Amino acid sequence: MSSGIDCDAVAQSSYSSLFGIPLSLWGAAAYAVIAVVCIRGLRARTGAALGLFSLLAASAAATSLVLIGISAFAVRSLCILCAGTWLVDLALFVLAAALNREHGWSRSVRDLSRLLRGHPGKAFVVCALLAGGLLTATWMVLPPAIARVDSAGPAASAPASQSHGGAPVASAAVPTGVDDFGHHYMGAKEPKLTITEFSDYQCPFCARAHMQLRELVAHNPQSVRLVHRHFPLDNECNPAILQPFHSHACHYARLAICAGIMGHFWKANDYLFEHGRDVTPITSEAFAKAIGLSLSDLDQCLSERAPALLKSDLDVGNQLGIEGTPTFVVDGKTYTGALPHQITDPYRR
């Protein structure tokens, strides 16, 4: 919906899964446990059931507060579907508070303690759930934060085999060039399959799809060609975008265009996909230093040559009816999000 309300950004962040399992599945399991407790509580009408429900509701609300903080300060994007579950969690806690106001908090705690003392197995399960919740919160917050610190340096210094967005980058040995229309490509000089990608450096799915296709090219350097073109979802330069969305994407596309003119397109492409969603926008000065370009030459290119070349890509993209990124063109047909398996499977090993 906007740069601040973007489920794609949340889904592609390092916080969206735990131990390889999406948070939505963890949440479904937690709601199932709460549902079982509620059903048993309705049947038994005991203070112990209410105490256990209250404990689970408080844990759910606390988890939501952690996720709200991560969304606001780490990912800096909100998924409205996630926000819906946070409201459910907070509503559960409010319900638990209302029930305990009638029953009495101390009585619920006392009944729950008596139940757990009399059933060591249940006590173990409850303690395991609480310990697991604490470890989960720690695991969610610390590793991504450490990773952000470790990756704070310029991407230009990263090795060619570094992973971007979960997929390996193609080997530096893969041939690259410029086609007859002036567009940068990697792969075959005489391809059997040509894939043209229209991409945006602030789009997380674009980075992942691009690296996956580079892997495909790396395995088929004599038969597959990947051509890169720009389609920033930014109303500053793209007439199809009517409101602010990826507010720096036009500038980043121009930076890549100028780097290509100066002979460093793929190095710039890697840097922009790596840092395009950083909280601090990429400046011309930082970009020139990271890629190894003359700042004065870069500024001249940005003002004189890049706007027209970017407009050419945007005009073609809008003529094709592109509405989102990444979009791929193969034999004149467009595919948004991903290519059909029947196109890529013959080239996979």
Image (tube, grey):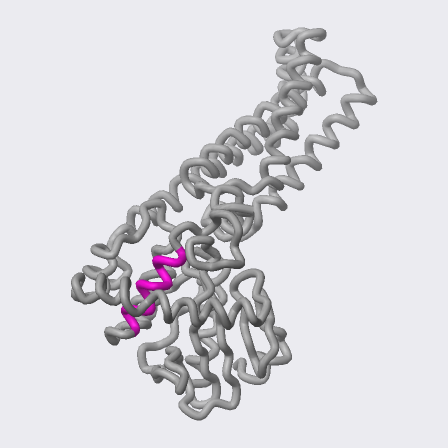
Q: Position of residue 64 (x, y in %)?
A: 55, 31
Left or right of 144 in this view: 315:
right
Q: Quadrant of residue 228?
A: bottom left
In front of the other: 50 or 248: 248
Q: Is residue 37 above or below residue 75?
A: above
Q: Position of residue 46 (x, y in %)?
A: 75, 15
Q: Is residue 273 above or below residue 81?
A: below
Residue drawn at (47%, 67%) of the image? 314
Looking at the rendering, the stretch of residues picked out in magenta corresponds to 249-260
Question: Magenta stretch: dominant SS?
Answer: helix
Residue drawn at (60%, 42%) of the image? 26
Q: Is residue 55 visible?
A: yes
Left or right of 334 in this view: 222:
left
Residue at the right extreme?
Answer: 43
- Whether the magenta-drawn stretch holds residue 253 is answered as yes
Q: Is residue 342 above or below residue 131?
A: below
